[in-house]
Image: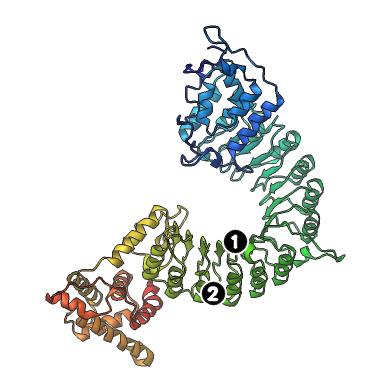
């Protein structure tokens, strides 16, 4: 290969070990965007902790090289001995020009021009390998396994960001060892790489004096050696994400804290040996902390937290959970001095059982710009806390109040009305909430996620309000969790799916109306660890499953039913239920006049629906027997039939004579069916939920 620029050169011999396409990136036109890890986005969208823009990082890297002026310019002569114009440009200018290239494919094209240009930009190509698929994973492994003497460059020294979190199931100790000696690493991301050992992680860290961030979320068996290697080698460390460090000793944690004063983000979830001394040392040695996660650190008390809130002026995010030691006193000052938490944006006290209204009111005053508030399983809080949170107003985007069973519609409505920019709200297991809360939720213009699991008092009317109010083609709602809301039927969910085109997840586990084969065929597979009963009531729809459910319900509710086919189906249901039943114990009806009246209304409605509407001639005695069967405990095999029966009832048109006219051949085509919610429907819904579905 010539060292001179040559636009006709088609390959770079010194990169032959990688092939013409080193990392499996397809070559595209310069004005096209390179794919991200999922093949759909641009380079700048590739996932990496603590960074927003890979393209920007490449620019900074290349321009830094230009400013340093450390690259020796080479004489650029063509084969005819004439100096080419572009060769006149100094390397610093070339670096600035190359910094405007927007994709790795463009950079590779430049690198294949000549060795001189390749030397300028090889670091940009390798500083962050985009390991987003098995193919790229395997290609990179083959290249890294080649002896250094057989490659054009020592690629390890160019890698600064190693992210294996997109292929965690493929990563092994042997593969990770291929990156030993990559001492210029600045960021290591091993999220969910559960097949690697702490020894091999320590080996990678050794010698990485420039390491700024390491994410070990989901890695099993984190031990002291990792912490000691970080302490001894990584003085510039700013981000440590190591949840699940329950085997790590207090001594190892303190060694790391004392050696890494630049720490800004620390996640030590479930590290059992973290106590007040560790927190105090963290505050003393790492004054620039902006994010701390102490989930499951049960030895921490008010004393160290008060010190933390008093001294960390840059703190933006604080999380702690499962800690009964924490009370309002962590926000109280014995000297009367006020804590300053103006910069706090995210606060999480999950399952801190002694967090009360007093603590919530205090922290909201100290941190008036909170964006995310998580008080899940803080069972002592009441509506007073919700009224305090409501003062956050437009700042609040995310609130989690699951299992706070003391809150009511009054507090929830105050919160929702005041915080109109809410995007995420979880009220799971808040059993006192009713449709009134859902009515207010329906008014939120930016709502993306609602959690109402086990809110048993929510009925069809609440979900219909959610579907009807302020819902349009630009609706933002994406995820709705309604599992174990036992009073729901199919119709409002159909309306919700129709009104919310961006909905990609809906959970209806345990809602009996949806446990039908024609519906459950679209739901996700239940987790393997579920028992048989849990699997039988599992009903969660995601992604394509939501679209399929939407289309199925549209067909059920909007496709006109053939009257003759509908009549035959009704007769089959009645016959199947009363078959072999001569009589039903009448003690229930003779002892309770209310039940007798309910039965009479039910049978009268059946008579109109079956005999008048469909023009059939079913004896009233059969209808009465059918009604008695419905009011008593049905065998489980009849429950889907009754569900289908009620669905047909809810779907019949406002004016029965239209169907009769169509059946008798009168002129005029019958109008499309309208959805009817007749007065009797409320009765059927009550019967359905309270008695028939009990067998499920």
Position above or below: 47 against 332:
above
Residue at x 27% of width, y 75% of height: 652
The tag on residue 433 is: 2
The answer to whether marks 1 and 2 mark residues whose Cβ atoms lie closer than 8 Å is no
Which one is nearer the viewer's eye here, 621 or 87? 87
* 17 to the left or right of 610: right
Which one is nearer the viewer's eye here, 6 or 534? 6
Query: What's the coloring here?
Result: rainbow
Q: Which residue is mark 1?
A: 398
Which one is nearer the viewer's eye here, 418 or 235? 418
Residue 501 on image: x %, y %? 41, 59
* 655 to the left or right of 550: left
Residue at the left extreme of this rendering: 665
Kind of element beneath mark 1: strand
Q: Quadrant of the C terminus?
A: bottom left
Residue 255 on image: x %, y %? 78, 41
Kind of element beneath mark 2: loop
Q: Earlier in the sequence, mark 1 or mark 2?
A: 1
Q: Residues within 10 Å of mark 2 (few under 14, many from 20)?
A: many
* 8 to the left or right of 598: right
Which one is nearer the viewer's eye here, 156 or 631? 156
The tag on residue 507 is: none
How many numbered marks appear? 2
Residue 616 on image: x %, y %? 17, 79
Residue 286 on image: x %, y %? 78, 46
Position above or below: 116 against 518:
above
């Amino acid at each position: 290969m010539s060292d001179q620029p040559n636009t006709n050169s088609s390959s770079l011999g010194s990169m032959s070990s990688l092939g013409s396409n080193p990392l499996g990136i397809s070559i595209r036109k310069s004005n096209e965007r390179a794919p991200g890890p999922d093949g759909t986005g641009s380079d700048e969208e590739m996932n990496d902790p603590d960074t927003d823009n890979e393209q920007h990082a490449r620019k900074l890297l290349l321009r830094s090289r230009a400013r340093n002026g450390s690259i020796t310019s080479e004489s650029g002569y063509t084969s005819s001995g004439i100096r080419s114009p572009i060769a006149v440009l100094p390397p610093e200018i070339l670096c600035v020009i190359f910094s405007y290239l927007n994709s790795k494919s463009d950079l590779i094209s430049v690198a294949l021009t000549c060795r001189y240009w390749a030397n300028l930009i090889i670091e940009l190509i390798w500083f962050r390998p985009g390991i987003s698929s098995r193919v790229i994973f395997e290609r990179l492994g083959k290249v890294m396994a080649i002896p250094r003497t057989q490659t054009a460059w020592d690629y390890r020294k160019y890698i600064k960001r190693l992210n294996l979190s997109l292929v965690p199931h493929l990563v092994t100790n042997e593969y990770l060892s291929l990156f030993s000696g990559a001492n210029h690493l600045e960021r290591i991301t091993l999220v969910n790489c559960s097949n690697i050992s702490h020894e091999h992680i320590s080996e990678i860290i050794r010698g990485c004096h420039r390491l700024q961030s390491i994410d070990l979320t989901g890695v099993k068996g984190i031990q002291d050696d990792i912490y000691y290697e970080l302490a001894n080698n990584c003085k510039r460390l700013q981000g440590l994400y190591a949840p699940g460090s329950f085997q790590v000793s207090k001594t190892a944690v303190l060694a790391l804290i004392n050696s890494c004063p630049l720490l800004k983000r620390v996640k030590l979830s479930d590290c059992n040996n973290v106590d007040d001394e560790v927190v105090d040392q963290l505050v003393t040695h790492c004054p620039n902390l902006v994010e701390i996660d102490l989930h499951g650190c049960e030895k921490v008390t008010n004393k160290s937290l008060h010190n933390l809130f008093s001294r960390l002026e840059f703190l933006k995010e604080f999380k702690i959970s499962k800690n009964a030691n924490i009370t309002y006193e962590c926000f109280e000052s014995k000297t009367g001095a006020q804590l300053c938490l103006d910069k706090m944006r995210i606060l999480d006290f999950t399952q801190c059982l002694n967090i009360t209204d007093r603590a919530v009111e205090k922290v909201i005053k100290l941190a008036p710009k909170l964006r995310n508030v998580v008080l899940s399983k803080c069972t002592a809080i009441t509506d007073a806390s919700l009224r305090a949170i409501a003062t956050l107003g437009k700042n609040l985007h995310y609130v989690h109040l699951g299992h706070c069973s003391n809150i009511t519609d009054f507090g929830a409505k105050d919160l929702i009305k005041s915080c109109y920019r809410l995007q995420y709200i979880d009220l799971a297991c808040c059993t006192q909430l009713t449709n009134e809360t859902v009515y207010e939720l329906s008014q939120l213009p930016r709502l993306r996620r609602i959690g109402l699991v086990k809110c048993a008092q929510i009925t069809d009317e609440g979900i219909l309000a959610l579907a009807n109010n302020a819902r349009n083609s630009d609706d933002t709602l994406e995820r709705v969790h309604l599992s174990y809301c036992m009073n729901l039927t199919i119709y409002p969910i159909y309306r919700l799916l129709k009104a919310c085109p961006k909905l990609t997840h809906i959970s209806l586990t345990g809602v009996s109306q949806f446990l039908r084969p024609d519906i459950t065929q679209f739901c996700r597979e239940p987790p393997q660890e579920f028992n048989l009963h849990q699997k039988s009531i599992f009903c969660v729809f995601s992604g394509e499953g939501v679209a399929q459910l939407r289309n199925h319900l549209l067909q059920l509710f909007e496709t006109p039913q053939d009257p003759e086919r509908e009549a035959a189906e009704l007769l089959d249901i009645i016959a199947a239920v009363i078959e072999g039943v001569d009589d039903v114990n009448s003690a229930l009806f003779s002892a309770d006049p209310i039940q007798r009246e309910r039965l009479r209304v039910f049978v009268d409605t059946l008579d109109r629906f079956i005999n008048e509407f469909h023009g059939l001639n079913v004896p009233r005695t059969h209808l009465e027997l059918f009604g008695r069967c419905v009011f008593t405990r049905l065998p489980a095999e009849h429950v889907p039939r009754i569900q289908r029966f009620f669905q047909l009832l809810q779907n019949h048109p406002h004016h029965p004579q239209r169907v009769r006219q169509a059946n008798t051949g009168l002129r005029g085509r019958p109008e499309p069916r309208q959805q009817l919610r007749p007065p009797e429907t409320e009765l059927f819904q009550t019967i359905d939920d309270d008695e028939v579905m009990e067998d499920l």
